[in-house]
């Protein structure tokens, strides 16, 4: 199995919400961009929630979400995996959340983009700082086959923590 190394966090001192995936898929790792697969619902859903048009540029997307208080990262720093499926993850090593939470005390909530991300976080024994809430969201992945509208209904919870 091939060792995969994740991406650095997208976060700043304005971040209130941290959205965590498990580990970026192959296309995202190739592009060095979160949610780089155009079939993933992540970017269209987030920009619909923010009531903003979806920029074509990845850098513009990042700039806008950071201004609105949204941060991105993954539970795993690295793992062994063939392909992009979460079910193929082996030997996962967690990111340094103690350091992240210490540097960004303004975080109010962690949202897991899919069940696997949340289960990994909990199974690895990572703890949240006092007062930070966590929530599971339906995965934005095209592999998660509920409709975008059903996903959006759950993802609306993010907005409560942004203002």
Image (spheres, rainbow, N blue to C red):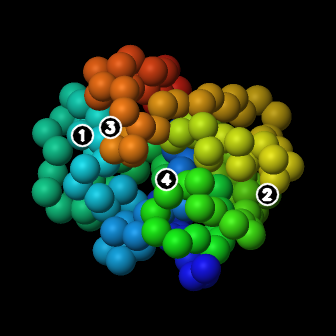
Label of residue 46 in the image? 3
Mark seen at residue 128: none
Mark 3 → mark 2, Cα distance in angstroms: 26 Å
Residue topped by disc 4: 72
CA distance for labels 4 and 3? 12 Å
Tell me, yes or no, whether the two marked residues, 1 and 4, touch with CB atoms within 8 Å: no
Other residues around mark 3 within 10 Å, as few (<14) / some (14–19) / many (≥20): many
**Quick one: label 2, few (<14), some, or many (20+) residues within 10 Å?**
few
- Is the residue marked by circle 4 packed among few (<14), some (14-19), or many (20+) residues within 10 Å? many
Q: Which of marks 4 and 3 is nearer the N terminus?
A: 3
Mark 2 secondary-structure assignment: helix
| Contact check, label 1 and label 3, Cβ < 8 Å | yes
Q: Is 93 above or below relative to 64?
A: below
How far, Cα to Cα, is label 1 from label 4?
15 Å
Q: Please give the label number shown on residue 98.
A: 2
Q: What residue is pinned by disc 1?
A: 44
In the image, which is nearer the foreground, mark 3 or mark 2?
3
CA separation in Å, label 1 and label 3: 6 Å
- Where does residue 69 sit, x and y in percent of width and height? 45, 42
Camera-side residue: 143 or 110? 143
Judged by depth in the image, the label closer to the viewer, 2 or 1, is 1
Which quarter of the figure is the N terminus placed in?
Answer: bottom right
């Amino acid at each position: 199995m091939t060792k995969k190394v994740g991406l650095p966090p997208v976060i700043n001192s304005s971040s209130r919400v941290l959205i965590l995936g498990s580990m970026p898929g192959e296309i995202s790792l190739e592009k060095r961009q979160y949610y780089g697969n155009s079939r993933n619902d992540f970017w269209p859903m987030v920009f619909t929630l923010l009531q903003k048009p979806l920029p074509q540029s990845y850098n513009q997307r990042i700039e806008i979400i950071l201004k609105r208080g949204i941060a991105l990262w993954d539970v795993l720093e690295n793992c062994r995996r063939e392909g992009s499926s979460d079910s193929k993850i082996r030997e996962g090593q967690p990111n340094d959340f103690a350091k992240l939470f210490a540097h960004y005390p303004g975080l109010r909530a962690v949202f897991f983009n899919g069940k696997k991300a949340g289960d990994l976080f909990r199974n690895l024994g990572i703890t949240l700082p006092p007062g930070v809430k966590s929530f599971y969201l339906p995965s934005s992945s095209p592999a998660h086959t509920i409709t975008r509208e059903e996903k959006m209904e759950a993802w609306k919870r993010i907005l409560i923590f942004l203002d």
